[in-house]
Image (cartoon, helix red, strand yellow):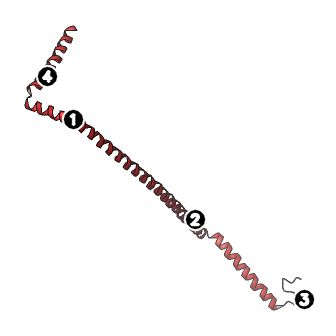
Amino acid sequence: MSDKNGSTSAGKPDVAALREDIKQTRAELGETVQALAAKADVKARAKEQVEQTKQRAKAQVHETTGKVREAAAAAVGVASEKVRTAKAQAGDKVALAGDKVALASDKVKESGALDKAYDARAQVERNPIPFAAVLAAGVALVGIILIVRGRRK
């Protein structure tokens, strides 16, 4: 016989060795039964799979959130710089336009065109008849042109 079943060279089985062998076999058998039971427990395996999937999803969400925050921070930085640049350019253009308006105002004052316009207005207010006569002549001219065109047809 072999050493595995507890035989000695004298042929007499060693009781302590047999007991130890039985104890080890029972432990191995228990582990095997537990492994088979775990494989047969579909519900527990499904729960474990769901839990693993949830953990992977949480990790991906955390990673993606970090990437999105980084991208948003970069976009905010770029936008802020563009706003600063646009603000500076707008300020320069406003200053240039103000200078041009001041120059044009000075030219109008120098030419006296504003004074002439005020004088013409005052004259029309004082004596509206020549203005009304010019207006009436214009209306009469338009009427005559329309009558002549109507007769040609």
Q: Nearer the viewer, residue 34 or 61?
A: 61
Q: Are marks 1 and 3 in contact (CB under 8 Å)?
A: no
Name the residue rendered at 46%, 57% in the picture: 76
Name the N-terminal-most of marks 3 and 2: 3
- Seen in the picture, residue 88 relative to 35 is either above or below; the reply is above
Q: Which mark is drawn over residue 56? A: 2
SS at mark 1? Answer: loop
The residue type indicated by label 2 comes to Arg
Mark 2 or 1: the one toward you: 1
Q: Nearer the viewer, residue 49 or 3?
A: 49
Label 1, residues with CA under 10 Å away: few <14, some 14-19, many ≥20: few
The residue type indicated by label 4 comes to Val
Q: Are marks 2 and 4 in contact (CB under 8 Å)?
A: no
Mark 1 or 4: the one toward you: 1
The quadrant in which residue 124 appears is top left
Task: Name the residue that disc number 4 marks.
Answer: 134
Q: Residue furthest top?
A: 152
The quadrant in which residue 126 appears is top left
The residue type indicated by label 1 comes to Gly
Name the N-terminal-most of marks 2 and 4: 2
Q: Which mark is drawn over residue 88? A: none
- The residues bearing labels 1 and 4 have C-alpha atoms spaced at a distance of 25 Å
Label 3, residues with CA under 10 Å away: few <14, some 14-19, many ≥20: few
83 displayed left or right of 23? left
44 displayed left or right of 143? right
Quadrant of the image containing the N terminus: bottom right
Task: Name the residue that disc number 1 marks.
Answer: 112
Task: Name the residue that disc number 3 marks.
Answer: 11
- The residues bearing labels 2 and 1 have C-alpha atoms spaced at a distance of 82 Å
Q: Are marks 3 and 2 in contact (CB under 8 Å)?
A: no
Name the residue rendered at 24%, 37% in the picture: 110
